[in-house]
Image (tube, helix red, strand yellow):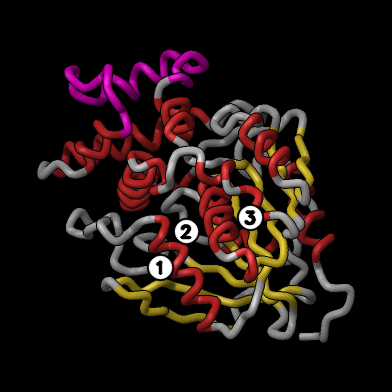
């Protein structure tokens, strides 16, 4: 992809005790005196990889990355079936963000999120609008029950063969019910072979329903059984609880975002998170600009989406910043 800023390494990092036996990995990159910006990664369970650092001008921003509970370098690891997810919820993650903000001595920051990270970023901003200077969001999701049903069942109309395999991996008696609930049960099965098959089939379907745009390449992370288990456990955990949010909450409370400038970038071919989700949010949030990319799909799937996201972080960078 063109237009990315050069790779940068953290100048500071650590493990933050956020309670409940959880320690969250965090790092800061770029200009220590720059404008604070928080990265909220997707998944849930993807972790904040180094690619995120390159979406910002490192001379202008103090870029903060963190791995959400249970994933990346945070501990304990959700890939371990003994790791309880009882204290891994959206309210807990919002609290973790606030603990991190205070730990770093930041009053407010630009918040950027993609996919699940949009849901979490919106939930955080609606609860703490005074600490959010701007929002940059791509692949907009709200993690509603309708969205979960869309991805796990309705998308079978687009990929019938692949969806049949996804459905048939669960016990026959559960195939007409909630597939996310069925997979969550399988991922908690005492038999490791059942858990491993569930993680494999879940991630195969994840890689399928985002493949609507030209040039899609399979996500190499799904080749790692450890990553598959962590990712599948966390996604099914959050999806079966509709993001631990009241249904429709993020759209209903969008008025709390008034006064926060935002850019939402969404691919028209993103049918994992259909564009109407972003469109309805834009109608309720007058300070946001919606950028629809004609021939791209979910995530930073192509140059145009990535360039639109970087254009947004460039737009919001300070006019002047002290050198590193």
- The residue that disc 3 covers is 256
Disc 3 is placed on an element classified as helix
Q: CA distance from mark 1 to mark 2?
A: 8 Å
Q: Is residue 210 left or right of residue 176?
A: right
* Magenta: main secondary structure: helix
Q: Nearer the viewer, residue 102 or 315?
A: 102
Q: Do residues under tags 1 and 2 come within 8 Å of each other at their CB atoms?
A: yes
Q: Which mark is residue 47?
A: 2
Nearer-N-terminus badge (1/2)? 2
Mark 2: give few (<14), some (14-19) or many (20+) Cα within 10 Å: many
- The residue that disc 1 covers is 73
Q: CA distance from mark 3 to mark 2?
A: 28 Å
Query: Is residue 170 rendered magenta in the image?
Result: yes
Q: Nearer the viewer, residue 286 or 228?
A: 286
Residue 135 in picture, x, y percent from top left: 69, 57
Residue 109 in picture, x, y percent from top left: 66, 71
The residue that appears at 61% across and 37% down in the rendered structure is 298
The residue that appears at 37% across and 75% down in the rendered structure is 18
Residue 90 in picture, x, y percent from top left: 42, 56
Total of numbered circles in the picture?
3
Nearer-N-terminus badge (1/3)? 1
Q: Is residue 142 left or right of residue 305?
A: left
Q: Which image quarter: residue 10?
A: bottom right
Mark 1: give few (<14), some (14-19) or many (20+) Cα within 10 Å: some
Q: CA distance from mark 1 to mark 3?
A: 33 Å
Magenta segment: 154-180
Q: Nearer the viewer, mark 3 or mark 2?
A: 3
Nearer-N-terminus badge (3/2)? 2
């Amino acid at each position: 992809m063109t237009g990315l800023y050069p790779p940068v390494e953290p100048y500071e990092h650590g493990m933050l005790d956020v309670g409940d036996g959880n320690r969250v990995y965090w790092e800061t990159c770029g200009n220590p005196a720059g404008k604070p910006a928080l990265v909220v990664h997707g998944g849930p369970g993807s972790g904040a990889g180094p690619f995120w650092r390159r979406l910002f001008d490192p001379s202008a921003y103090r870029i903060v990355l963190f791995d959400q509970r249970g994933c990346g370098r945070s501990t304990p690891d959700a890939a371990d079936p003994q790791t309880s997810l009882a204290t891994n919820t959206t309210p807990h993650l919002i609290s973790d963000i606030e603990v991190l903000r205070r730990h770093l001595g930041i009053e407010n920051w630009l918040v950027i999120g993609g996919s699940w990270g949009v849901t979490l970023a919106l939930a955080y901003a609606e609860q703490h609008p005074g600490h959010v200077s701007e929002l940059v969001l791509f692949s907009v999701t709200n993690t509603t029950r309708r969205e979960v049903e869309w991805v796990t069942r309705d998308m079978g109309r687009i990929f019938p063969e692949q969806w049949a395999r996804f459905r048939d991996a669960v016990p026959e008696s559960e195939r007409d019910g909630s597939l996310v609930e069925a997979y969550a049960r399988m991922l908690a099965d005492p038999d490791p072979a059942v858990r491993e098959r569930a993680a494999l089939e879940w991630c195969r379907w994840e890689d399928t329903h985002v493949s609507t745009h030209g040039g899609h390449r399979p996500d190499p992370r799904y080749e790692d059984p450890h990553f598959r288990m962590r990712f599948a456990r966390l996604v099914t955990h959050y999806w079966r609880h509709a993001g631990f949010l009241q249904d429709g909450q993020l759209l209903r409370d969008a008025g709390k975002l008034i006064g926060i400038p935002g850019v939402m970038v969404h691919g028209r071919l993103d049918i994992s998170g259909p564009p109407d989700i972003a469109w309805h949010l834009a109608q309720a949030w007058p300070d946001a600009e919606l950028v629809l990319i004609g021939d791209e799909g979910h995530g930073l799937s192509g140059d145009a989406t990535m360039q639109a996201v970087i254009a947004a972080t460039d737009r919001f960078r300070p006019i002047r910043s002290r050198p590193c």
